[in-house]
Image: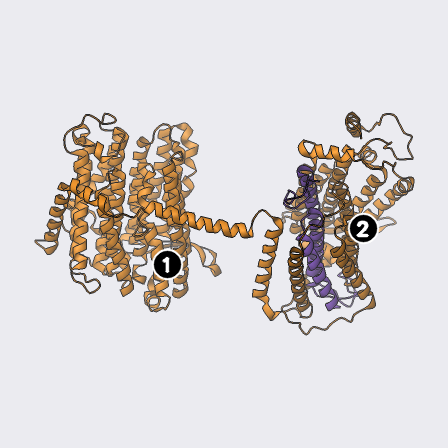
Amino acid sequence: MEALVASGVGVLTAVGVYLCLRGRTFPVVLGLSFLSYAVNVFLFASGRLIVGRPPIIDPAAPGYTDPLPQALVLTAIVISFGMTALVVVLALRAFLEAGSDHVDGREPKGREPR
Amino acid sequence: MDLAPIVLLPLLGAVLPPLILRSGRNACALVTGAVTALSLAVLLVRAPAVFRGEVLRESVVWLPPAGLEASFFLDGFGFFFAFLILAIGLLIITYARFYLSREDPMGRFFSFLLLFQGAMLGIVLSDNVILLVIFWELTSLSSFLLIGYWRHLAEAREGARMALVVTGAGGLALLAGLLLLAGEAGSFALTEILARGETVRASPLYLPILVLVLLGAFTKSAQFPFHFWLPHAMAAPTPVSAYLHSATMVKAGLFLMGRLWPVLAGTEAWFLIVSGVGLLTMLIAAWIAIFKDDLKALLAFSTVSHLGLVTMLLGLGTGSAALVAVFHILNHASFKAALFMTAGIVDHEVHTRDARRLGGLVRLMPITGSLAVLAALAMAGIPPLNGFLSKELVLEETLSVRYLGSETLFPLLVVAASAFSVAYSFRYAVHVFMGPVRSDYPHRPHDPSPGMWLPVAVLALPIVAIGLFPEAVAGPLVHRAAAALTAGAAPDTPLKLWHGLSPALVASAVALVVGLVLLAAFTPLVALRARLWRPEAKVMFEAAVAAVAALARMVSEAIHNDRLQRTLAWALVAVLVVGLAIGGGAFAAGGRERLAIAGMGVVVWAAGVGCALAVLRFHHDRLLALILTSVVGLAVSLTFVWFSAPDLALTQLSVEIVTTVLLLLALNYLPRESPRESSAARRGRDLALALASGVGVAVLLYAILTTDFALPTISAYHLAESKPGGGGTNVVNVILVDFRGYDTLGEIIVLGIAALAIFAVLDSTFRGAAAERLRQWRARARAADRHPMVLVVASRAMLPLALAVGVYIFLRGHNQPGGGFIAGLVVGVALIVQYMASGWAWARARTRIDYHALVGLGVFVAVATGVGSWVFDRPFLTSTYGYLHLPVVGAVELASAALFDVGVFLTVVGVVMLVLANLARVSARIEPQQGPIEPMDSVPRPEPQAPMGAAVHAAARAAPEA
């Protein structure tokens, strides 16, 4: 399973990076979402992968996975939402102000504002 | 014994003058003087110990591994400098009070002056070399501020910039040199470095250390070829020139060479570089000084020349020469500060400092004139003034110096420089103050108020007294300082006025005669000099700065133009390069036991990776890309479920829903498709970067996952203490609200701030260009169906259920997966569904909660819970818990952490609603109102009654419809 998780995170990172390098704001926002997924899973996995041992104290439990990365990632997920929201609203406002959703705030040469 | 107050008093006192200025200029100067006097008093209290030969230390340890500690020490040499700084400082403050005109902002001036004073004291008292460099740069900064004090003058700004660039760059070299030195000596403490001279001189790094340290010292003390900044610094007000650029700051370089003398001096390299540069500077600057018509420029070059003289003495590397160096620093400080002040008086009273327009002033301003002539004679080295003594000693030290195999070169040049010095000193005295009274002064000269000439008179005292009774007046101070400088190698022969008919006296007489002849031949000499080629330092400096700036602009525009894509690509390249450099091939798979691949895992992996790759292919269709992205989010949630993280799965799931709704709302206003505009080359570049990043992350993660922990994790503590210490069995939740409650508190505050920022960005959308575009957007209006019945009814039936689920998730959170974050998101989703199903206006009209207040309330509850611990005399956010026994329900746990979780819950609900409702509101404010806006289950009314919607609808009607 380690190889699956590692390769999955790799793909998420690659897609996130590619989208972040696009010229329009919306793909960049999606790219940031992808990077958030990748980073969150990465951090979570740094506690190593363990199946069926959630960190819920139970006398019958055979053992527990590492709870600390989970706590870190839980707040990271919520913060990523705040970040995505802020970025998308900025992108929207920039589009409304400039008439272009290009990341540079203006259409590249030879294109009409939309 | 406390030494820090000597430094801190002026630094902290720097805030006072601007505050006191309202009480008048006298009060302002008095406060500045009082701060200085207090610092001086603290210093003088330590004098007896210093004169007994003790070395006082004070140390505040801060970061020992990094070599950072605030440590000071005071020995004879430090005392000598500190005394000069503070004593001359007092005179300068008095002088400046009367020099500055009513229009000059005096508070700022004295504030900068105290800042400088503190920094300078810091240099001379620092024991830690890094602290020394910090103070060193602080003097450069305060000097910059003071030179540029008259900020309306271009030359002041240019001079300030030049001084900052030259001395600041030297400071960086010094930092590098001192770090190397500390490394070789094995300590950051000067007191320890000073004892390890042998080790340092034997080190292969000795030469680099020497060169770097000397770069710092030479730039600061304006040694050739860095001498050019000092004359341009004369754009500063004269008190500044007298204080910083003559008596104190420019001597920081000398101080440094003296301080490190026991470590660095005594080698061939030291002798050749330091004495050579010193002699050259002394000679060139003295020659230039003769021809400067501007009095301050003349004095500036003469200062450079005298700094060169002291540098040369230190370069000789003998104890007796070092003694003379200390003695001359004292003498120079006294007569040069006096000379600058008289130049300032002339400028102040006659409104010019051009020597060609002056002359005969001694008759019109007798007090100033006599004092100026006296100081000039001291500078020329005329007995029985203090300048004569040190000059005799200088000649005595240098007449037998062999340099580069020549026995005559060194003495000859020293005598030549002395002759030049006589020439410019007499020029200052004769051309300005002697001769006939003229009729064409720009302003009728007369002596200034005593406030300006008294400080000069005070300085005249040591000029004469040291000349007549050197050992009695200056002996102890100079000997103590020289002994500390040389670590005991300086001779303790008493200073005396008359040395007998020595070769030095003869040389001195020769210099005097030659100097006077030069002055007599001044006019032909000027004509001769006009024909010689002279490099223009300022032009060269500015060309160099312009070239460097152009290069920097070229590089930064290549990397960081205002194109996000290129900037980001470069940043990624940098990250990849650093990653490769650090990791390289080290990310190998480890030996940890692998988990068997499960069939379900492969399915989830395939779904996630497949959708991610599909986004890559179809990202131009934004709606499709968004849907595919949310599938990836679901795959991530499932990953969390699979690997024992139910809390994360719940959070990811609810965040996924909220984010998708958010992006859908945003997409409503944005173009539905991205144009295909990237060139094949760019797509190739981006793919390569993406591939490299992805592979790098995957390899790194695989290496981590297959390696066991190198050290035991701290999680064992959390697992063990969760129930007994935090009162909950859900360890993740206990960590969030208890162990790491501070982090969570910070996080909900950040969330609240983000939500407020979003509100601010959206709330001003209805003005200006944005509003115009929204109107056009509405003109292209789309279908206006009423909100569909099925969704309306279903969502309303679901609402209580969904809220109940939220409460349930919250309540179980401490022991089972759940908690404030997840509950907040669930409740937020439940409410948002109402907005989606029935429309913004309908939902808003029925909501009685202000979401801003909700965010604030949440943060308040969380903070109040933390503060509550204080009532029980415990630290902030200490948790406690107990059980409440209820009939039927049984034991209900009540933990204070649960209250904290309520704060988290309220904040999250508030943030989600504030963001989504405001984004939806943009839609509601501009949605075309052609059709009925009410949901189907309410009877359509002619006028909507919603209090908040009314204005909106009215506005919508008033605008032209498409």
User: Looking at the picture, does residue B325 appear above or below residue A86?
Assistant: below
* Letter of the chain in purple: A
Q: Position of residue B537 (x, y in %)?
A: 32, 47
Foreground residue, B650 or B567? B567
Viewer can see residue B958: yes
At x 82% / y 49%, what residue is drawn? Answer: B808
Q: Residue under mark 2: which chain is it in?
A: B
- Tell me, yes or no, whether dots 1 and 2 are on the same chain: yes
Q: Earlier in the sequence, mark 1 or mark 2?
A: 1
* Residue at the disc numbered 2: B809
Q: Is residue B75 left or right of residue B609?
A: left
Q: Is residue A60 left or right of residue B482?
A: right
User: Looking at the picture, does residue B311 appear above or below residue B364?
Assistant: below
* Residue at the disc numbered 1: B212
At x 75% / y 58%, what residue is drawn? Answer: B612
Q: Residue under mark 1: which chain is it in?
A: B
Q: Position of residue B707 (x, y in %)?
A: 67, 70
Viewer can see residue B494: no
Q: How is the image coloured?
A: by chain
Q: Quadrant of residue B740?
A: bottom right
How much space separates mark 1 and mark 2, taking CA atoms? Answer: 65 Å
Q: Amino acid at mark 2?
A: Ile
Q: Amino acid at mark 1?
A: Leu
* Letter of the chain in orange: B
Q: Quadrant of residue B696?
A: bottom right
Tell me the SS state at disc 1: helix
Q: Is residue B127 left or right of residue B784?
A: left
Quadrant for the C terminus of chain B, please. Answer: top right
Foreground residue, B750 or B144? B144
Q: Farthest residue toward the left? A: B501
Q: Position of residue B169 (x, y in %)?
A: 40, 52
Foreground residue, B932 or B259? B932
